[in-house]
Image (spheres, coloured by chain):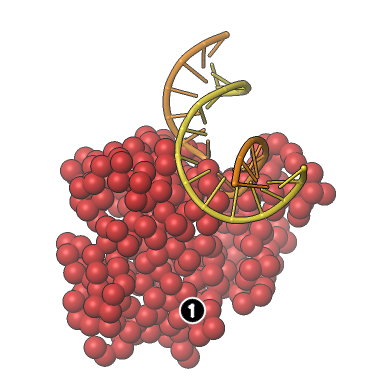
Chain colours: A red, B orange, C yellow
Amino acid sequence: MPILTLKQPEGFSFRSTVYSHGWSELRPFELDVSRWRLTYVFTNETGTKASLGTIFEKRGKIFLDLFDDKVPAEKALRDTAHILRLDDDLTGFYEVVVKHGAVPWAAERGAGRLLRSPTVFEDLVKTICTTNCSWGLTKIMVTNLVEKLGIRAQGGSRAFPTAKAMASVDEDFYRDEIRAGYRSPYIVELAQRVASGELHPQNWLTSELPTPELKKEMKKVKGVGDYAAENLLKLVGRYDGLALDSWLRSQFYKRHNNEKPCRDKKIERHYSKFGEWRGLVIWCDMTEKWIADI
DNA sequence: GCGTCCAGGTCTACC
DNA sequence: GGTAGACCTGGACGC
C-alpha cells in the first residue's frame, strides 16, 4: 500500500494531540513514543475487515501507512482526521486563554486537541471502563474487549469490537473474561441498544441539542454519570463541562489549593470565566507537565 | 499471606 | 436535590 498523506491545520501538534490524554494507551491504539508513531487498527464501514495503520508526522504533514488494503484508504483517512481532530477550530479556546492569561503555552505547543476514537460508541465504552477504577484496570478491560471480541487484522492486531459483536455475549462473559465487574450489565445493555439501532451515539457529534440536554441524553446510558458524560462531551467537541474525576481533583488541589481538598464548587468557580471552553482549560492546566516533557 | 484502602464514579433508595 | 451505601477489580500498603 502507498503511504497516504493528510494536510495538517495551522498550529497543529502531532505530539500534543496523541499525548493529550490516556487514550493512546488504550487498544487498539498503541503509541511508540521513541519514534512518535501511533498505530490503530482501522475497520471498514461494516466492521467486517480490519487493517493496521501507522500514523506519523513528517515535515508538516500527517502520514498514514496502511499495512494492507482490507480497509478502503478513504475510510482510514477519514478516521485518521477524526482521531486527530484535524477539523477542530480552537480559535476561541486560544483567544480566551490569552485574554485571561491562563495556560499561555497552549497555542504555542498546539495543545487542546483531545485524541479520540473513530466512533463515539468506542469512546463511550472506553469511558465507562474508566469509571471507579484504576487506570491499570481500565487498560485491562479495554485490552480484553479488543483481544476477545475484536476482529483480527493481518499481522495479528485486533480492532475494537463492533456493537454487534459486543451484544453477542452475555453479562457473565463481561464479568469473567473482560473483568468489567458491576459494569457488565451496563455494557451489555449499551451494546444491545446500539446493535439494534435503538441508540445512535454517533449522532451526538452533530446533535443540535444544547449541551445540558445532550448531557442528559448521554446520562440515559447506564454507567454514564456526570464525569463520563462530560468526558464524552469533550470528545464530541463541547467543553462546557469540567469532567471532574479523582485525578483531576487531586491535581487541582496541588496546583491551586495548597494541596488541600475543596468542594467541586470552588473548582467550578475557578474556571467559570473561561465559559464554553472551561473543560479544555482545566484539562490543559492540569496536564501542562505532560505536554512540557514531550 | 491477609486485610484494608482506593482508584480517571454511578446507581438506587430514601429523605 | 441531596445523601448514604453498595458495587467489581487489582494494586499498593501495612502488619
User: Quadrant of residue A82 in the image?
Assistant: bottom left
Percent x, y for residue A138?
A: 47, 54
Residue A71 to residue B11: above or below: below
A134 relative position to A87: left or right: right
Q: Is residue A214 visible?
A: no
Q: Is residue A286 visible?
A: yes
Residue A62 to residue A87: above or below: below
The residue shown at (37%, 57%) is: A144
From the image, tell me which residue sits under label 1. Answer: A32
A75 relative position to A146: left or right: left
Quadrant (top left, top right, bottom left, bottom right) of the N terminus of chain A:
bottom left
Percent x, y for residue A85?
A: 42, 67
Name the subunit of mark 1: A
Q: Nearer the viewer, residue A143 or A62?
A: A143
Percent x, y for residue C7?
A: 46, 33
Quadrant (top left, top right, bottom left, bottom right) of the C terminus of chain A:
bottom right
A61 relative position to A93: left or right: left
Percent x, y for residue A219?
A: 41, 37
Q: Which element carries disc 1, helix, strand or loop?
A: strand
Amino acid at dot 1? Asp
